[in-house]
Amino acid sequence: MAHNCNLSVKGIIGLALFSKMCDIVGKDGTYWHAKAEKFATEWVKAADDGDHYRLAFDSEGTCSVKYNMVWDKIFDLGLFTAEVYTKELAYYKRKFNGYGIPTDNRSDYTKSDRQMWSTVLFDDKEYFDTVCKQMVAFLSETPVRVPFTDWYFTSQPIHRGFQVRTVQGGLFINLLKF
């Protein structure tokens, strides 16, 4: 999708991590870190949609789970402020369906790995517990007996596609918080 806010977060974080790699190999990464900070500040303004941040910069009234921000938290980059995370958390809590939170506003499907990545964004046990309980509800109630799919609907316990994929390792991302 053109102008995707979540994917641009990945690019911003990539610059910040490149700056860290420069520092590790003895090169000055200051320039690249400053660029990442500048882009993060611009991102907040361009993606703002009032009570949340958009799916795409040029699409008012859209939304998506900003799971790529996980690396800002895991690597303690500090690119996005607490206010950004607080705003997103409040919005996500209003978007849950019976089996999870939709990845974005285009459909009510979700990805299990992305949901779990989103739990790292917030120090919020209630949110974490809700994500986990709703995944368990999906697994318990789905009539489709395939290995744990990572792509399924949040309004009904039906898998959308995908099964037996390595992305399910993302369910363990909280183990990286140390």
Image: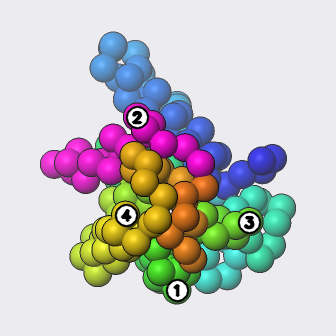
Tag 1: amino acid? Arg
Question: For mark 4, what is the residue?
Answer: 139
Magenta stretch bounds:
161-178
Image location of residue 76, percent across then percent down:
31, 49
Distance from the alpha carbon under mark 2 to that under mark 4 = 18 Å
Q: Which residue is mark 1?
A: 94
Q: CA distance from mark 2 to mark 1?
A: 30 Å
Task: Answer whether residue 34 is visible to the viewer in this image.
Answer: no
Marks 3 and 1: which is nearer the front? 3
Residue at the spot of label 3 = 106
Q: Position of residue 73 (x, y in %)?
A: 35, 53
Q: Residue at x 52, y 80 (%)?
A: 97
Foreground tag (2 vs 1): 2
Closest to the observer, 87 or 111 = 111
Q: Is residue 135 above or below residue 36?
A: below
Describe the element under mark 4 as helix, strand or loop.
helix
Residue type at mark 3: give it: Arg
**In front: mark 2 or mark 3?**
2
**Residue kind at label 2, given as amino acid type:** Thr
Q: Earlier in the sequence, mark 4 or mark 1?
A: 1
How is the model colour-coded? rainbow
Tag in front: 4 or 1: 4
Question: Which residue is denoted by mark 2 in the rendering?
Answer: 166
Amino acid on which disc 4 is placed:
Leu
Using residue 174 as the reference point, say whether residue 52 is left or right of it.
right
Counting residues from the start of the chain, the first of labels 4 and 3 encountered is: 3
Gap in angstroms between the C-alphas marked 4 and 3: 23 Å
